[in-house]
Amino acid sequence: MKKYIFLLSVILSFLGCEKEMMDYEGKDGVYFCVQEVPPSLSGNPEIWAHIDTTLLPFSMLLENDTTVWLKVRVMGPVVGSDRYFTVTVIDSLTTATVGEDYAPLEKRYVIPAGERDGYVEFTGFRQEKMLDSVYYVTLQLEENEYFSLPMSIWRPLEHEDYTDENQNAIRHVVGLTDDVFLPKAWTTNYLGPYSKKKIKLLCEMFGLQMADFDNVVDMDMERQRVYAQGLDKYLKEMEAKGETVYEDKLDKDGNPVKMAVGPLV
């Protein structure tokens, strides 16, 4: 009985302490708070997954010069005056060239009065050399008179295994490439296995931009199905003429792979 009374007193003591929990103390800090926008574009942005790498895939974008805003958040209270934070490039972890592949950074960036977030404006430039390669820029927050760096790692609480999910909170990597990656709006059951050759063919056939396949709102299931039916008709016509369209790869036996749509077409 004494054991249960002791446990109850511990629980009550904990609940009493919770009401008196202290706010963050010490010098205010900053950390990168860049998050991954889900394909649905919905949900609470405050609980979107944090990421420590941002990719600029120029093949999916409509402009040769592309700008992203990388969010930096304050750890500490909001104040009534502007504060500044600084960011540097880690040369040893950077393969892109400043002034050629990306615009020089500002000397400092602002956290506006009454706000807890500021943004690093990063502009990348499309280059021919990026067709088959990714060029990286590694950014790092620096301590200054306004902010320290109290949090080096972001640990998502929703994952049991923190080791595989840790994100660097004071560094952020930007990748610049013109390579073609699997877009968000690609349903294998309709469009079949993804390939660079196939998405380029779809763009040529239907007057599309590759960026269209990254828009899950406009490129819905019905639209994908219609495009897949058109592609299927074209592939069959080409095969009937003896001009079968093949992918740019071979199967495990070394034979060319025919381009095909998905099983639901």
Image: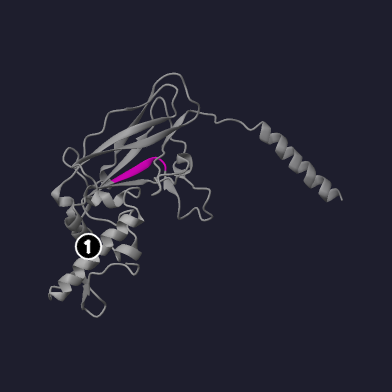
Q: Nearer the viewer, residue 62 or 231?
A: 231
Q: Nearer the viewer, residue 132 or 246?
A: 246
Q: Nearer the viewer, residue 91 or 159?
A: 159
The type of residue carrying mark 1 is: Lys
Q: Please name the residue that numbered disc 1 is placed on.
A: 198
Please tell me which residue is depicted at 23% across the width and 59% down the height of the picture.
199
Query: In the picture shown, does residue 234 fall above or below 51?
Result: below
Query: In the picture shown, does residue 160 fall above or below 265?
Result: above
Please tell me which residue is depicted at 39% across the width and 24% down the height of the picture.
112
**Image position of 111 (left or right of 46):** left
State whether the magenta stretch is mostly helix, strand or loop: strand
Q: Residue furthest bottom?
A: 253
**Image position of 216 (left or right of 21):** left
Percent across and percent down for residue 178 are 20, 51
Tell me the colour scheme of the image. Answer: one colour
Percent across and percent down for residue 11 are 74, 43
- Residue 214 seen: yes
**Image position of 18 (left or right of 262):** right
**Quadrant in the picture for the C terminus:** bottom left
Please tell me which residue is depicted at 34% across the width and 37% down the height of the picture.
70
Percent across and percent down for residue 63 are 20, 42
- Residue 135 seen: no
Q: Nearer the viewer, residue 257 or 75?
A: 257
- Dot 1, crowdedness within 10 Å: few (<14), some or many (≥20)? many
The magenta segment is 169-174
Q: Residue furthest right?
A: 1
